[in-house]
Image (spheres, rainbow, N blue to C red):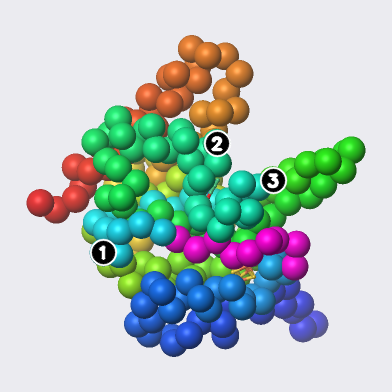
Amino acid sequence: MAQRIEHPGASAYLPDASGAGLDELAVAVQHCRGCNLYEDATQAVFGTGLRHARIMLVGEQPGDVEDRAGAPFVGPAGGVLDDALGEAGLARADVYLTNAVKHFRWRTSPRGKRRIHERPTTGQMVACRPWLEAEFTAVQPSLVVALGATAVSSLFGPSVGLTASRGRELRWHDCPAVATIHPSAVLRVPDSDDRAETYRGLVDDLRSAQTLLET
Ligand code: URA
Ligand code: SF4
């Protein structure tokens, strides 16, 4: 029986299989039809930041705010990330920041008033990965940081979980890599003490990740 191809993937939409620049990629991604997510999103949200940053941070996908604004991590999770980067001695301007999936996946809330985030499927992550690979090739970072379980699955495979990979020295395409929690996980913790502890964990991970940078 022939296998059903769920999503064609982004490869056909990349400007050039090898060596496209970030500006060129950011234009091309707006025309991507590599999976179905472009249909219900406002726009693709491409990575931003330092062109040849030493650290490339990978989130999940744009959220509601990012989908409208066209930039990654500019909503509530972005606020947490900015604070955590600052405490770890980094600024957003020092890093390259992107997502595993470039279009917002959402469903309508029960009363139809809000767009509720939905985690991208494995098929959608795989479909979108050529954009991430192209960003990696263009930026040539010395360290990749996966923020949360979706980024971990996208980078290291669908069966690799965050718990098993957090605190380990990983590699992605021969580049040192680490995994930590997603900043939105901090926002989801109801108790304020627990939330502060979760946030500290994110800061500590971002701080210790930098020790993997070759000096
Ligand atoms: N969450 C993400 O993973 N990425 C964003 O850009 C915003 C929220
Ligand atoms: Fe293309 Fe990724 Fe958007 Fe899917 S989510 S249409 S693969 S850019």
- Amino acid type at circle 3 is His
Is the residue marked 1 within 8 Å of ligand 1, measured from its CB?
Answer: no
Would residue 115 be counted in the magenta stretch?
no
Query: Which residue is label 1 attached to?
Result: 52
Determine if residue 174 is in view.
Answer: no
Q: Residue at (36%, 67%) from the top-left corner? A: 136
Boundaries of the magenta span: 39-47
Report, in whole angstroms, how far the alpha carbon at label 1 lies from the one at label 3.
31 Å
Q: Is residue 183 above or below residue 192?
A: below
| Residue 59, position as x, y percentages in the image | 49, 50
* Residue extending furthest toward the left: 215
Q: Nearer the viewer, residue 23 or 157?
A: 23
Q: Nearer the viewer, residue 71 or 191?
A: 71
Q: Is residue 117 left or right of residue 1?
A: left
Marker count (numbered): 3
- Amino acid type at circle 2 is Pro
Tell which circle, 1 or 3, labels the residue nearer the N-terminal end.
Answer: 1
Q: Residues within 10 Å of mark 3 (few under 14, many from 20)?
A: some
